[in-house]
Amino acid sequence: MDIWVCTICGYEYDPQKGDPENGIQPGTKFEDLPDDWVCPICGVGKDMFEKK
């Protein structure tokens, strides 16, 4: 699974870890994140992420 990086703050979304603090279970692909999911660090949307 690909790691996605926030182009604003550098946060890395790792699908193997998910984002449990925000209700995203480990194993959740970036493409399967809810449309309203935002970067947990800076709050930008998924459109501001790119593959690492």
Image (spheres, rainbow, N blue to C red):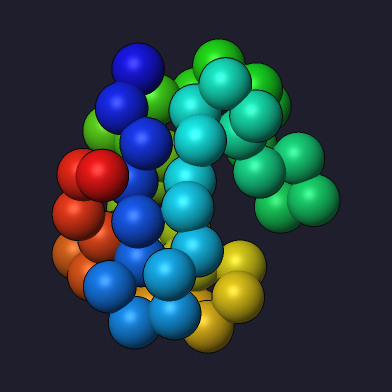
| Foreground pick, 32 / 6 | 6
Q: If the image is split into quadrants, where does the C terminus sit?
A: top left
| Foreground pick, 39 / 52 | 52
x then y, percent, for residue 50: 20, 54
Using the rendered view, name the quadrant where residue 47 is placed. bottom left
| Foreground pick, 52 / 16 | 52
Looking at the image, which residue is at 52% across and 83% down? 42
Using the rendered view, name the quadrant where residue 6 is placed. bottom left
Q: If the image is split into quadrants, where does the N terminus sit?
A: top left
Give above or below for 35 relative to 8: above
Give above or below for 42 relative to 52: below
x then y, percent, for residue 4: 33, 46
Give above or below for 1 relative to 4: above
Q: Residue furthest right?
A: 21
Looking at the image, which residue is at 76% across and 40% down? 20
x then y, percent, for residue 40: 61, 67
Left or right, residue 22 beside residue 14: right
Number of marks drawn: 0
Looking at the image, which residue is at 35% across and 56% down? 5
Using the rendered view, name the quadrant where residue 10 is placed. bottom left
Looking at the image, which residue is at 51% across and 35% down? 14
Left or right, residue 10 beside residue 16: left
